[in-house]
Each structure stands twice: as C-alpha cells, then as structure tokens.
Image (spheres, rainbow, N blue to C red):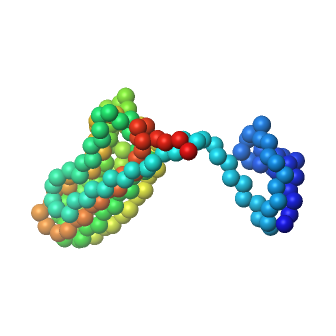
Amino acid sequence: MVAVQNSVVNSDYRKIVNLSLLELPALNVGSTLQPVFIVDSAHKEIKIANAERVVSGGDAIFTFNTNETVFLKEITLSFSKNAACDVGSGFLTVRATPFGQLLSDIIRIPILNLTAEYNTITIPFDMRIASGSAVTMLAQTYAAGLFHRNIVIQYYTESNWSNA
C-alpha cells in the first residue's frame, strides 16, 4: 500500500476540480489513485423514447406530459435507404419546441433522391422543452424503394429527480 498525505491530494486535486475547501483524510491506496468527487446529490433518471418509420409518410411523434418539466439529454437519429427510393432530395428533420421559443428544427440531415444512403448521428442536448410539446421526426413521402428512419430520445424530467 502507498500512503498518500492530505497535502499531496489537496494540492493536485484541488487544481483539477477547482475546489478551494477540499479536506481529505490520509489515504492508503494501491498503485493507482482514482479519486471520486460527488458534485451533486441529485440524480437524474434518464428516460428513453424510441420511434421508427419504415413506410412512406407519417410523422414519428413523442409527446411529453403537460405537468412535467422536460429536458432533452440526447437524440440519436439514423436512417438507411436504397438507391430505388424516390424520396425527394431534402432533409430528414427533427423538430421540438424549446422552452420559451417557437417550434424549431433541432436536427437536419441531408438526403438525396435515388441514392443509397445511411447515416447515424447522436447529438447531446441540454435543452428544456416546452411542457406538453412534442419531439417530431417529420414524414418522408416516397412511392418506390425502402427508407427506414429511427429516432431515440433520451430525456429527464424534474418530476423524476431523486436524492441519493
């Protein structure tokens, strides 16, 4: 065991986490020191919503409750289509209403007509959205070919916070 004195731990880790009042007892540790700092006692339970479309038309919509304050954590949007898909050139679009703002496009991925394509994009968010609003993956209309779209939404609400 290696004995680490407070002065070493305090000087090195105070700089890393920028804390002025860090008081740690003398520690006996192995050859590796892995400090763990608990910054906040509130833990967020991440919820996941998933929607997909494999046919022409129709929005994929996830609507949040009006009595919850919702924060988007992350959105993963993916698609694949074959060269026979005659969807018009444009964008695969996700819309939401940020708190205090108007409905907005929050993700836009360009797509091409009659071109085999696939893409997955994951975007981290820290955005509060308006209560009772929805996250919508807009419809894509086509007559031929295959076009698979999927959206995974990670979010948390103030109503499901718990203290450790």
46 over 132 or under it: above or below:
below
* Residue 24 coordinates in the image, percent (x, y): 79, 46
In the rendered image, the quadrant that contains the N terminus is bottom right
76 over 42 or under it: above or below:
below
Q: Count every numbered label the image shows and give the total.
A: 0
Taking depth in this image into account, of 41 and 109 the one nearest to the observer is 41
Can residue 138 be seen in the rendering of this structure?
A: no
* Residue 41 coordinates in the image, percent (x, y): 58, 42
* Residue 42 coordinates in the image, percent (x, y): 54, 41
Q: Who's the residue at 40% across and 58% down the image?
A: 121
Taking depth in this image into account, of 47 and 150 the one nearest to the observer is 47
In the figure, residue 86 lies in which quadrant? bottom left
In the rendered image, the quadrant that contains the C terminus is top right
Q: Who's the residue at 33% across and 37% down the image?
A: 97
* Residue 21 coordinates in the image, percent (x, y): 78, 37
Taking depth in this image into account, of 31 and 152 the one nearest to the observer is 31
Can residue 131 be seen in the rendering of this structure?
A: yes
Residue farthest along the top direction in this orientation: 100
Would residue 124 be found to the left or right of residue 29 on screen?
left
Would residue 42 be found to the left or right of residue 54 on screen?
right
Q: Who's the residue at 53% across and 41% down the image?
A: 163
Would residue 82 be found to the left or right of residue 67 on screen?
left
Residue farthest along the left direction in this orientation: 143
Residue farthest along the front direction in this orientation: 164
Q: Who's the residue at 88% across and 52% down the image?
A: 5
Taking depth in this image into account, of 37 and 109 the one nearest to the observer is 37
